[in-house]
Every structure is written in structure tokens, then in C-alpha cells.
Amino acid sequence: MPSAEAPSWRNRFRARTCRFLAPVLVGVPFFVALAQQTEQAPPSPTISVEVNLVLISATVRDKHGDIVPSLNGGDFVLYIDGHPQAINNFVRQGDLPLTLGLLVQTGLGPSQRYAFHNATDASYAFLDHMLREDKDKAFVVSFDRKVELLQGFTSSRSKLQAALQSMQTPELGNEGRAGGTQLYDAFCLASNELMRAQQGRKALFVLSDGIDRGSKKTLEDAVEAAQRANASVYSILVTENWPGPNGKKVLGRISAETGGRMFRISRGSTLSQIYAQAEEELRNEYVLGFTPTPLGLGAGYHRIELTTKQKDLTVQARHGYYSDK
């Protein structure tokens, strides 16, 4: 059975639609507090004037695809809408708090259900490895023809395991599928209702075939919601030999534009191996903070161009951010 904490959230997930509230900006005092957790940062006084600071999480790889974990803030070059920006704050992953969201599609086709049955143990092992007691937290959402929060924010292993074990696959329809799949609604609701208010690093993991059937929201809504929540999306594609649309482009776009990555389950890449790769990325992230100049740059979407001074390195980061002013 789902956690006792879930019913009120489940009702909200069914009834509420995607809302966009405030831009993904945080005040300087918050980032200063994070920076003080690193060994390099000296104690800093609290700044009483609230200045909007935009955060970018980034992973860097060399030409061989290996993660580069030892860069400094001065090694990066940042442009917003073509304007050069000063990187005001820089923190390696270190002790920053991490919030994880796990979104699992239960309405999979008949030949995809092997992935669902393997998801419980592999997902629990990943959460068990990643979460630190009293610092990190996670939630679990299932979606098919409806979106359900099975477990709200917690670092409790037993509650997360119970939520994963409570997932059930719906009955297959006449065409071998389990009805609707509200993928975009799940992204919007998880981003806006859960991730949006959280601070620190944030990542959404979605196990899906990437094909939406019946959402009220669109792909553009889903991308924007994740970007406004500053949540990196790690998509795990489950495919089958089935006539019809392919969800690879959908999950690939959401992952790329939010600074995450798309994986595909195959015989040579199991769910456990995929989680291990994602864990390595999350443990070697950089977090950069900047105050946009010209100040504010105006409301709307702003394009991020983040590179390194070393030309043979590749930066994985979100493509942009939203501001309401």
C-alpha cells in the first residue's frame, strides 16, 4: 500500500494542473550558505540585500567521455543571450543537499514489462546509495492513465522501498497497452508541485517509453516546468518492437534541455548499470551561480551557453532558464 502520507498529495495530483509560479532564482544568502559548506570557501557574512542569483548544475567530460571532476570556477566561460557573465559563486558537488524524484510509468506494453519488474530493486539500490540521512530526500511518483504520488519527500529507506513495492501495472487493453500514459502531466506536476520549492541540487529520474497518451499538458509545458524548477531530467528509455511513435526524441529533448541525460535499457545496458552511470554524474557535478547582467535581462526565457576554456572538454548543462522580471 502507498505511504500514509500520500493520499492528500495524490488528490492534488489528480485535480490540479501545471502552474508556473516564480522564476528559478534564489537569493544570495542561500547560495552563500551552500558555498560555506565547501572546504575552499572562507566564512562569509550574511548579505541582507536580496539579489537574484541563477544556479546552473554542470557535468564536464573529456574527449574520451570521462568525467572531469577537478575544475575551478575560472575554468568556465558563461554567456546568457550572448552577453558574457561573471560567475559569482562556484561549488563542487561536495555536501550540497540533493533532492531526487523518481517517476515510473506503470502502463507499459507487454514486451516492456521486464523493465517494470526490475525497476523496484534497481531503483531502491540507487536511492539507497545516493541519499544521505538528514541531508538528501526523494519522492516516488507512478503514472499511467493517472498520476499518483506514492511517497512524498523522505530520506527513509523503508518508506521509499514500500512505495516502490506498491506500484502495480494496470490491465492491458485490447491493443496490448494499458490505456493512457500521462507523461507530460507527470513532469509538470512533479516539477511544479514538488521540485519547485526545493533548494539545492535537484534531479528527476523517469522510467518510460517516452510516448504520451492523454496528458492535458504538452511537451513544451513539460520542458518549461522542469527548467523553471531547475531540475535536471535523467530519462531511462524503455522501448519495444511496436508500430507507432518512438519516444526517444521526446525524452532526449527533455533531458538535454534540462542538463540531464537520456539512457536506454538494453541487453548491454541494464537498469542497474544506468543508475551507476547517473550516480557518477551526480557525485561529480559543479554548481555555478551568477547574477544576470544587464541586470535581469528582462522577463521570459534566457539562453545559457556554458563552456570551458579548455577546448576539448564538453559541458553538460541546462540550455536556459526562465525569469519573470
Image: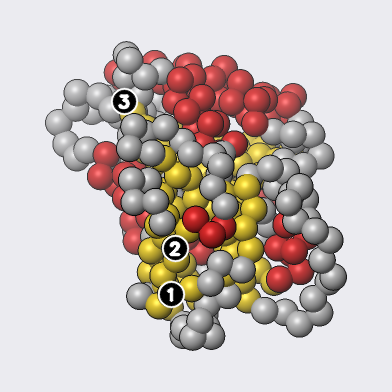
Q: Residue at x 42, y 55 (%)?
A: 308
The residue identified by callout 2 is: 77
Q: Which mark is residue 109?
A: 3
The residue identified by callout 1 is: 84
Disc 3 marks which amino acid?
A: Gly
View extreme (left): residue: 243
Q: Nearer the viewer, mark 3 or mark 2?
A: 2
The answer to the question of whether label 2 and label 1 lie on touching residues, with beta carbons closer than 8 A, is yes
First-in-chain label (2 vs 1): 2
Task: Say if 22 sits above or below 15 in the image.
Answer: below
First-in-chain label (3 vs 1): 1
Label 1 sits on a secondary structure element that is strand
Q: In what quadrant of the picture does the N terminus appear? A: top right
The image quarter containing residue 62 is: top left
In the visual, does 180 lie left or right of 92? left
Find residue 26 and report its horizontal and vertical position in percent: 65, 68
Q: Nearer the viewer, residue 210 or 27?
A: 27
The answer to the question of whether label 3 and label 1 lie on touching residues, with beta carbons closer than 8 A, is no
Residue 142 visible from this viewpoint: no
Disc 2 marks which amino acid?
A: Val
Report the number of numbered marks.
3
Q: Nearer the viewer, residue 62 or 223?
A: 62
Find residue 223 and report its horizontal and vertical position in percent: 40, 57
